[in-house]
Image (cartoon, rainbow, N blue to C red):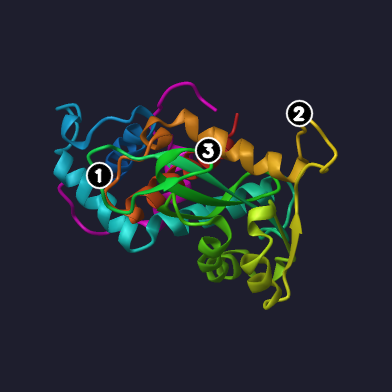
Amino acid sequence: MTKQWQPLTDYQWAAISPFFNLQRKRQHDLRQILDVILWLLRTGCQWRNLPQEWPNWQAVYYYFEQWSHNGTFERINLALNQLDRKRVDKEAFPSVLCIDSQSIKLNPMIGEHRGTDANKRVNGRKRQLVVDTQGRLWVVAVHPANQADGPAAVSLISNLLWRAGERLEKVYGDQSYNGVFAKALADWSIDFEKASRPESAQGFIPVAKRWVVERSIAWTNYFRRIAKDYEYTLLSSVSWLYLANIQLMLQRSQPN
C-alpha cells in the first residue's frame, strides 16, 4: 500500500483502458479523469474543492456517475481480481469467500438510507463485504445500519453466483449469517460455515477466516473518502468501495 496518491502508470492504464471507449473525441482525457477520481478516493476532498488545474468538478462527477450506473467499476474490479489471482498462481475465480459487515458513520447532513446499529451504537450505514481468502473484494452492498446482517446479505447471492461462477463452494461468516443467508446459499448447493471463536475462549482470539475480511475492512482506512460515508446514494457508496479495491489491485499488478 502506497502512503500517498500517485497517478496511474502506463502499465496500470493499459490494464484498465479497454473498459473505456477511447475512440471518441472528447474534451477531457479519460485517464486524467480517472486519476482525479482516485485522488478524491485517497484524499477525501469535496467535489467542489477540486484543484483548479484539473477538469471542472462537474465534468469529473459526470463520468463518475456514468461509470457507476453502467457497471464499469464493477467490471474493472472483477477483471483485476482475476488477474491478481492468476499472478499468484490461483484459479481466476474463488471457491471460498468470506463475508462480514462494517457499520460506518454517515455524514450528518444526509438523511437518506440512514439507520442505527444498536449493537455498535453507530448511526449511519452498514457495508456488507464479500472477499476471497486473500482479501480481494468481490461483492459489496451498502444499506441502513439498522438492517440485520443475514437478511440483508441474501440480496448479494445473485451477485456472488455471477462473479464467482461455478467454482464457489463455501462462504464463511459469523453467527449473524447463520440463518436465512445460510439457508439461501444451501438452495444453490453452497455451504455456509460459521467462523467464530470457541465459546469457551476468553478475550481476543483471532479467527483465521474472519481475520481475512476484517483485514480488508481495515484497508478502507487508507482511503479518506470511505473512512466515513459521505454519499447521498447507495450506488455512490458502493462505487467508492470497488474503486478502493481497484486501486489495491492496480498497485499489486505494477511490475517492480
Task: Give the Cα separation between the discs numbered 1 and 3.
Answer: 29 Å
Question: Can residue 28 be seen by looking at this rendering?
Answer: no
| Residue matched to label 3 | 248
Q: Is residue 62 above or below residue 6?
A: below
Q: Tell me where residue 217 appears, x and y as whole percent.
A: 55, 39
Q: Is residue 51 left or right of residue 45?
A: left
Residue at the far bottom: name it: 187
| Residue matched to label 1 | 110
Task: Give the Cα separation between the discs numbered 3 and 2.
Answer: 32 Å
Residue toward you, 222 or 142: 142
| Residue matched to label 2 | 203
- Magenta residues, as a range? 1-28
Specify the amino acid type for callout 1: Ile
Q: Is residue 20 above or below residue 197?
A: below
Q: Please tell me whether mark 3 or mark 2 is closer to you in this view.
A: 2
- The earlier-in-sequence mark between 2 and 1 is 1
Q: Quadrant of the C terminus?
A: top right
Task: Give the Cα separation between the discs numbered 2 and 1.
Answer: 37 Å
Q: Is residue 56 left or right of residue 181?
A: left
Q: Is residue 37 left or right of residue 214?
A: left
Residue toward you, 145 or 11: 145
